[in-house]
Amino acid sequence: MPKLKTNKSAAKRFRVTGGGKIKHKKKGLRHCLAHRSKDAKRNLGQMGYIHPSDERNVRELIPYK
């Protein structure tokens, strides 16, 4: 069976946890932050998890992680 190519842009965006979940950085923390509350900005700084329905697609992009 041939080797699979890793999608490099996906490899930089996603990490696999020890339990097998895929985590990612949340969007919306680059600019235009004046109107957001402190709680909202703090929440955006934490890692998010990929929805289970999207997990299969992401795993195909990063097969060796």
Image: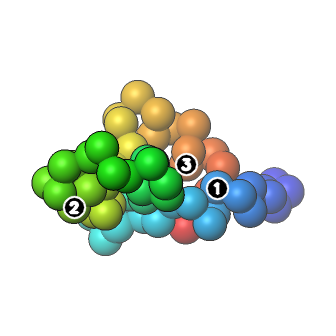
Could you say where residue 58 lies in the image, as x and y percent from the top left?
56, 45
Q: Given the current orientation, which residue lies at the most extreme bottom position?
A: 18
| Among the 4 quarters of the image, the one containing residue 23 | bottom left
Q: Between residue 48 and residue 30, name the one nearer to us.
A: 30
Residue of label 1: 10
Residue of label 2: 42
Could you say where residue 33 lies in the image, as x and y percent from the top left?
37, 52
Q: Are marks 3 and 2 in contact (CB under 8 Å)?
A: no
For residue 33, above or below residue 35: below
Secondary structure of the residue carrying tag 1 is helix
Given this view, does label 3 or label 1 mark the residue nearer the observer?
Answer: 1
The amino acid type found where label 2 is placed reads Arg
Q: Between residue 31 and residue 7, name the one nearer to us.
A: 31
The amino acid type found where label 1 is placed reads Ala
For residue 27, above or below residue 57: below
Crowding near the residue tagged with mark 2, few <14, some 14–19, many ≥20 C-alpha atoms within 10 Å:
few
- Residue at screen point 51% across, 38% down: 56
Quadrant of the frame with the C terminus: bottom right
Lower position in the chain sequence, tag 1 or tag 2 = 1
Residue 63 visible, this angle:
no
For residue 20, above or below residue 35: below
How is the rendered protein coloured? rainbow
Lower position in the chain sequence, tag 3 or tag 2 = 2
The amino acid type found where label 3 is placed reads Arg
Residue 16 visible, this angle:
yes
- Residue at screen point 63% across, 63% down: 11
- Residue at screen point 45% across, 40% down: 55
Crowding near the residue tagged with mark 3, few <14, some 14–19, many ≥20 C-alpha atoms within 10 Å:
some
Secondary structure of the residue carrying tag 2 is helix
What is the spatial separation of the Cα atoms under label 3 and label 1, in whole angstroms?
Answer: 10 Å
Lower position in the chain sequence, tag 3 or tag 1 = 1
